[in-house]
Image (cartoon, grey):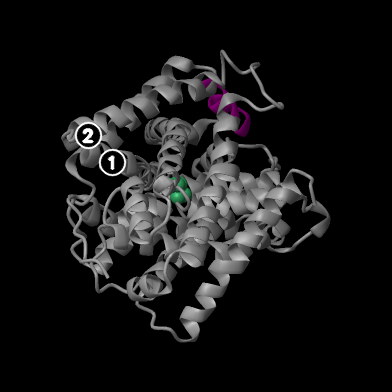
Amino acid sequence: MTEKRQSIHGQWSSRWAFIMAATGSAVGLGNIWRFPYITGEYGGGAFVLMYLACVLMVGIPIMMAEVMLGRRGRQSPINTMESLSKEEGLNPAWRYLGWMGVVAGFLILSFYSVVAGWTLEYIFHAGSGSFLTATDGEISEAFDRLLRDPGQLLAMHTLFMALTVVVVAMGVRSGLERAVKVLMPALFILLLIMVGYAMSTDGFQEGVYYMFYPDWSKLSAEGFLAALGQAFFSLSLGMGAIMVYGSYLPDDASIGHTTVSIVLADTLVAIMAGLAIFPLVFAYGLEAGSGPGLIFVTLPIAFGQMPYGQVFGTGFFVLLLFAAWTSSISLLEPAVAWLVENRGIARPKSAAIAGLIAWTLGIGSVLSFNLWQDYRLFGKTYFDIMDYVTSNILLPLGGLLIAIFTAWLMSRKAVVAELGLGEGLVFQSWLFVVRFVAPVGVVVIFLHAIDII
Ligand code: PHE
């Protein structure tokens, strides 16, 4: 075996710090904004089940593989893939897997920042108490008005991107650990309160039924792909975010346990978000499949009606902003780590350059809600395309290649040594899943969605 590498970017102070950071990356708009709206678009229960199956059968094993590759390579995903492939006597073109992740990161961050900008805007709305007096109609009108205002969207997108760049410039470790330790539990508690409120409405039963009763007739091949895409998106997999965080993981930390904790936390938050939102959708006679605005029209109605709604509402959007923030920094980190390693550019400048690229790409998403809303491809706007192409194509493709590299190409000795599971049943099961179940699953879902099988 080659000598243990060291990351030039430093290391997490402990396994716990890594769990916090990776959970911070995983839990974000994907759980609270995207999960409910995609579930609504694909019809509820059957989608949720497919989602859970994808998390279990594809998400967990691939996250373990991604963390393992990162820790072994100890560099940006591009250089990690190159070093590992050379070490294994494989074609160094595997570095393009790292490149694909960097591109996916830019594309995701570009629209992610726009949605995080809506969250920023809603902190002000909630704080001003405007939800308290507004009717349901006025609340959804306010959201539409925001979307029609490119200047405001751009301002919020810019502000959020600047926040992201600042943290990445300081190095993802400083501050992040402390912030996540307090904010994640706080977000969790607020979500619990929201679920509690949802229980008190007369839509609760219907909401729970909608989320957990699988109506298989609603499950399309498209929906299956969307469930897979959502699993990758929500767990931050397939683009190197988890790989780069893994590259800062101490050598003695158990990858298996760590992964399971992260996945559990992420899934729990998504389910709670669904339980907080769908009952409201039914109680207020809203449309479950109304798209990306779902939480921005349902939750404000609830905040307008519940006791202390102004406090809870402001708190909720602040915490959502932080959740988005701890995710967005992980979207930028792979590119920044590469700029520092290969171009020798100082971290702050690298962060600014990468942020500028993502910001520029995001302008298209800003405009897709107003000036460019009629420019469509297959009926999809620029924003829809960014979201679809990254979640449903690039991330699963990245995951597929990670699975192939790890389970088929890397030497077993290296995998066993780095994973630290021994060679017993747990290892064998993991290997089986990464070899067969995950790749075949991804390929079948892909082919099914494009109507080949
Ligand atoms: N997982 C994050 C969320 O759910 C988004 C993300 C995707 C972050 C891919 C990093 C990489 O909000």
- How would you rate the neighbour count of disc 1 (Cα within 10 Å): few for under 14, some for 14-19, many for 20 or more? many
Q: Which residues are magenta?
A: 135-145
Amino acid type of the residue tagged 2 in the rendering? Arg
Q: Residue at x 65, y 16 (%)?
A: 374
Q: Is residue 312 visible?
A: no
Residue furthest front in the image: 89
- How would you rate the neighbour count of disc 2 (Cα within 10 Å): few for under 14, some for 14-19, many for 20 or more? few
Q: Nearer the viewer, residue 366 or 244?
A: 244
Left or right of 390? Residue 88 is: left
Q: Residue at x 27, y 34 (%)?
A: 165
Find disc 2 in the rendering and name its residue.
Answer: 343
Q: Secondary structure at mark 2?
A: helix
Asked if 207 appears above or below 119 in the picture, the reply is: below
Asked if 196 appears above or below 175 in the picture, the reply is: below
Say if mark 1 contacts mark 2, CB within 8 Å: yes
Using the image, tell me which numbered label, if any, was put on residue 447. Answer: none
* Quadrant, the N terminus: bottom left
Rendering quarter of residue 55:
bottom right
Asked if 369 appears above or below 260 in the picture, the reply is: above
Find disc 1 in the rendering and name its residue.
Answer: 338
